[in-house]
Image (spheres, helix red, strand yellow):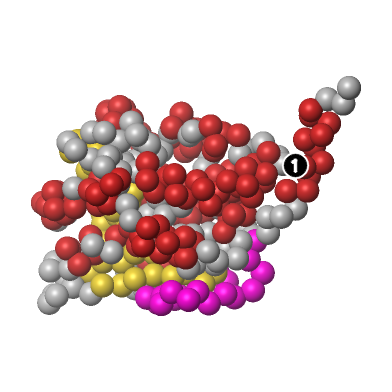
Amino acid sequence: MIQRSTLLLPLLLGLSGCLGFQTKRFDSPLKPFGYVEIDGVRVHYRDVPAQGEAQGAVVMIHGYAGGLVSWLHAQPALSDRFRTLSLDLKGFGLTDKAPGDYSSEAQADLVAAFMDKMGVAKAHIVAHSWGCSVALALALRHPHKVDQMVLTSAFVYPEQADGFLRWSQYPLVGEALFWLFYDQQLETRYTWSYLEPERHVSAKGLDYLKAFQATPGVDAAALAVARGMHLDALSAQYHKVAHQTLLIWGREDRVADPRYGERLAALLPRARLEILARAGHAVMLERAGTYHELLRGFLK
């Protein structure tokens, strides 16, 4: 009898060849905010100026399978005092998805280069989910560029990875999983991020998210990001981050359990933790009013 593994191998090999990075420029049907070129990568960004004289700058970093759309409401909420900038990290949204290094450290270097391009010497950093690992890498690699940090529902420890991400680390298996299921994962993650998805998830919003991510190379880039998280090595350095940090969590977060917030707050030398009731992983959207108040009260 032929073993199942013998039948599965040709399938995995065939599916692994279906993932490919972006090979040429692609213009999305969605209207972009703006583009800037960084080391050959066209980066999509949104720059909201301060109303009047700016008291500083805030750079916002999205999470895995997300984009700058995560901050559409937060940016105007801070614009009375700050210039706010958000960007789609490499591999996400309308930013290029070319081959290369997709580790949290490489994404942090991209953010640092983006700040230089935009004339921002130092900024407060606000991040969500896996984007918090990018923010922490930025604080470790470019500490002079970071003022205060707000880490939201942080996904920063290897133990937080679900089965999909863990299995994706294996050659061929990861390619097959992302080819077959990444689109469904987008919908699942989007819904799973809310405590009350019936109040916040709509067909229109989901269609927009899919269109926002539907650029060539998205599957290959997302897999490269999953394989480049390296959170075990990165988390060993968190205790060195000396920046004043506010951690914000949703009490009912099913993606990043609040106990990881307690763990991170105990490790970072200058951190405090705020846990908001009636909120899941997308706490900055479910509890937007309270979230914006916390940001405004914390950022100096």
Q: Position of residue 101 (x, y in %)?
A: 59, 54
Left or right relative to 116: residue 277: left
* Residue 225 visible within the image: no
Magenta: main secondary structure: loop
In the rendered image, the quadrant that contains the N terminus is: top right
Magenta stretch: give its range: 21-40
Kind of residue indicated by mark 1: Leu
- The residue positioned 59% from the left and 54% from the top of the image is 219
Q: Position of residue 186 (x, y in %)?
A: 47, 50
Q: Any magenta on residue 22?
A: yes
Name the one closer to the observer, 111 or 80: 80
Left or right relative to 44: residue 173: right
Left or right relative to 297: residue 221: right
In the rendered image, the quadrant that contains the C terminus is: bottom left
- The residue positioned 43% from the left and 32% from the top of the image is 160
Crowd rating for badge 1 (residues with CA inside 10 Å; few <14, some 14–19, many 20+): some
SS for tag 1?
A: helix
Q: Any magenta on residue 182?
A: no
Q: Residue furthest top?
A: 1
Q: Position of residue 174 (x, y in %)?
A: 64, 42
Figure label count: 1
- The residue positioned 30% from the left and 36% from the top of the image is 253
Residue bearing the label numbered 1: 12
* Residue 13 visible within the image: yes
Name the one closer to the observer, 193 or 121: 193
- The residue positioned 44% from the left and 70% from the top of the image is 44
Vertical comparison of 94 with 263: above or below: below
